[in-house]
Image: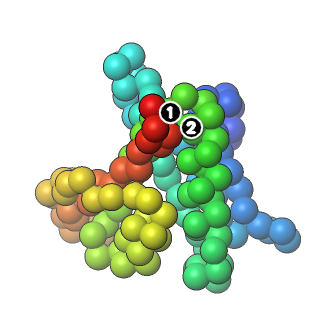
Amino acid sequence: MLAWLEAGERFPVLVAGETGVCGWARVAEYSPRPAYAGVGELSIYVDRAARGQGVGAGLLEELARRAAGLGYWKLTGKLFPENEPSLRLVRRNGWREVGRHVRHARLDGQWRDVLVVERLLDRGR
């Protein structure tokens, strides 16, 4: 995680929690190709004890605001299709499903599909 923090302001990292870390979110480089300079890949995590309390929604909204201010026009993310809490979170916060990568990840020795989601930022431009 230290490398995330040292990546610079172009790749924001947010941390939630008053007495300890209960969640984090970050924007990483989607691609080094100049054509994709305005697309960032989002990662988010909320501790089990903090889920359902608005932590994830707050992180998503603030990260989208900061990313738009840095010139990003889109954020993308990937999640496992059976992860219903994450699906509800992104759907409620302006994200849409755009595709599925089949056999894209291996977790615990099993192939997993991955759902691709995106959120357009600053839609007016």
Residue 69 occupies which quadrant of the picture?
Answer: top right
The amino acid beneath tag 2 is Ala
Front one among 121 and 118: 121
Q: Is residue 4 shown above or below 94?
A: above
Q: Position of 17 compared to 43: left or right?
A: right
> How many C-alpha atoms fall within 10 Å of the one at disc 2: few (<14), some, or many (≥20)?
some
Q: Tell which residue pokes out farthest to the right in this image.
A: 19
Q: Position of residue 40 (x, y in %)?
A: 46, 37
What residue lies at 44% left-to-right and 41% top-to-bottom? Answer: 123
List x then y, in percent, for residue 44. Answer: 53, 58
Residue that protrudes farthest toward the front in the picture: 124
Expressed as whole percent of the image width and height from the top left, the position of residue 19 reads 85, 71
Residue 72 - label: 1
Q: Are marks 1 and 2 in contact (CB under 8 Å)?
A: yes
Which of the numbered marks, if any, corresponds to residue 117? Answer: none
In which quadrant is the N terminus drawn? Answer: top right
Secondary-structure class at tag 1: loop
Q: How far apart, in angstroms, are the residues tagged by discs 1 and 2? A: 5 Å
Residue designated by label 2: 68
SS state under label 2: helix
Image quarter hosting the C terminus: top left
Q: What amino acid is at disc 1?
A: Tyr
